[in-house]
Image (tube, rainbow, N blue to C red):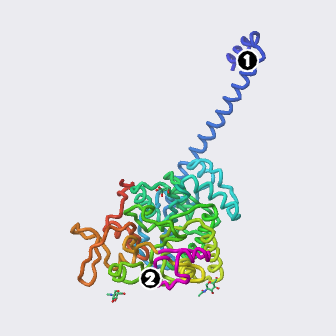
Amino acid sequence: MKSSLTFADQKTPTQTPSSSKRTFVAVLLLLYLLIIGLDIFRLKTDLEPRLTQQALEWQSAIEKANQPEDGKKDDNCNLNSGRGDGTWFGMTEEDRKVFFGEDPWSERDTRSEEKEVGYIKYIARRVAVNDTVVFIPTNDNFIELAMNLECSLRRQGITNILFWALDAGSNFALKARGLPVYFNPSLYGTSRCVNYHAPDYNRMMRERPKVWKWFLQAGINFLWMDADISMLGNPFKALRYDVDLEIQSDGQSNLTEWVIAKGGPAPNPPWGGCAGLFHLRSTPRSIKIMQEMQSLMLRDKEIEDQQALGTLIGNKTLTHIVGSSNANNDPPTLREAKEKGLFLARFVDPRKWVNGHQLNNGVELDEGGSGWVWKKDGKVMRLETPLAVHANGMTGKKKMFESRKAWFLDEEGRCQM
Ligand SMILES: *[C@@H]1O[C@H](CO)[C@@H](O)[C@H](O)[C@H]1NC(C)=O
Ligand SMILES: *[C@@H]1O[C@H](CO)[C@@H](O)[C@H](O)[C@H]1NC(C)=O
Ligand SMILES: *[C@@H]1O[C@H](CO)[C@@H](O)[C@H](O)[C@H]1NC(C)=O
């Protein structure tokens, strides 16, 4: 103390006004750095033991949440999904700032549709190519599948991938991996390992048409892909972009009519299209159909998203399905349908975009190495390697992907390019 006073005294006679100003600024700066330093130290010492201790609580919260709500055992629920890093539960705002830095949009008004469309423009345009994103929904429980899908897309050179985090856990887990995420906490989501058709599942699905509509209104086309898909080819090279909607078939039958007749699948509303895999272009017609879908789902609380979409695609006064022999289209030509302003849809080739029913019905990768085959009734038919392998409605999804050489993550969850 004394020596610093002496030092200051000695300095005083030679000091000019500007150098005293400089000393003053330097002292302020030092004080500021000291405060910041102490603050970081306080945060660090506060945070770490608390996080370690809380990790255990989060772990058990997740394990509990991972139990299927209807008590049914489903081996999809045994995935090592998100645990350890998707463990968001109980995290405070302060903790999140330390992990993710400041999110300039965290305080946005997520309930205003107009503002949300503005935000989607901001978030989707950062990853979009040709105004298009691959849009992948996931909750914390499906992170591992979602990461496999992302890896399968990157292997095809595709980078315009945007995730929709359905819960805070997946928002955390994806952001912690540095991946682009859309997250709207005012939409309904759950971290549970929900079974297909379970009430929680349906409630989550009801938010879909609203979000799809916002993306279209933001001028974004999207390839919607449920997390239980793995890509073995580049979807953007296979799409034709001549209609509003290109959608996978959710055909329940065996492959006979597809492989032998080589035609498109019979659209069989409401189950014809698979709401888990489709490409939708941002057009006024698409926006109108999403509005119809939203109001249909508001009117009918029981209807599921795929049924609602199927009902609209199957309605000839609203939709024209291209290239379908028995869709009984009226008007019959694409040009006339365009003139009438109908929503235009097409089913993608079911031999290249394989769904869960097909995978359950003998479409597999032959272990002898002869490639993809369809085995049925003792007969074997060779198939080309599909573009998309979609495990919709299947249990044991990861095992299925592994057996079809469509699982690309190593044991640590790293993408094998
Ligand atoms: C973007 O559009 C261009 C021109 O139509 C096309 O050549 C390119 O393949 C498209 N990129 C993707 C990723 O679809
Ligand atoms: C498969 O589908 C074809 C055509 O729909 C039908 O004739 C045949 O009986 C079916 N076979 C089996 C085993 O389901
Ligand atoms: C088809 O859509 C029109 C217009 O929304 C509606 O009036 C009609 O009832 C629908 N038809 C069926 C079979 O749902």
User: Bounds of the magenta span?
Assistant: 322-346
Cα distance in 3D space between marks 2 and 1 = 88 Å
Q: Report the residue at 60% width, 63% height from top.
A: 215
Q: Viewer-proximal residue, 148 or 254? A: 254
Which three-letter amino acid code belongs to the residue tagged 2?
Answer: Ser
Give the mark toward the camera: 2 or 1. Answer: 2
Q: Position of residue 222 (x, y in %)?
A: 53, 63
Whether 92 is among the magenta residues is no
Tag on residue 325?
2
**Could you tell me if residue 198 is visible in this image?**
no
Asked if the residue at label 2 sits under 8 Å from ligand 2, the reply is no
Q: Position of residue 76 (x, y in %)?
A: 42, 71
Q: Is residue 72 above or below residue 39?
A: below
Q: Report the residue at 41% width, 82% height from top.
A: 252
Q: Viewer-proximal residue, 82 or 4? A: 82
The secondary structure type at the circle numbered 2 is: loop
Q: Report the residue at 61% width, 73% height from top.
A: 290
Q: Report the residue at 72% width, 21% height from top.
A: 22
**Could you tell me if residue 276 is visible in this image?**
yes
Asked if residue 8 lies left or right of residue 201, the reply is right
Asked if residue 153 lies left or right of residue 87, the reply is left
Q: Viewer-proximal residue, 60 or 239? A: 239
In this figure, which residue is indicated by the disc labeled 1? 19
Q: Position of residue 40 (x, y in %)?
A: 60, 41
Q: Position of residue 206 (x, y in %)?
A: 59, 74
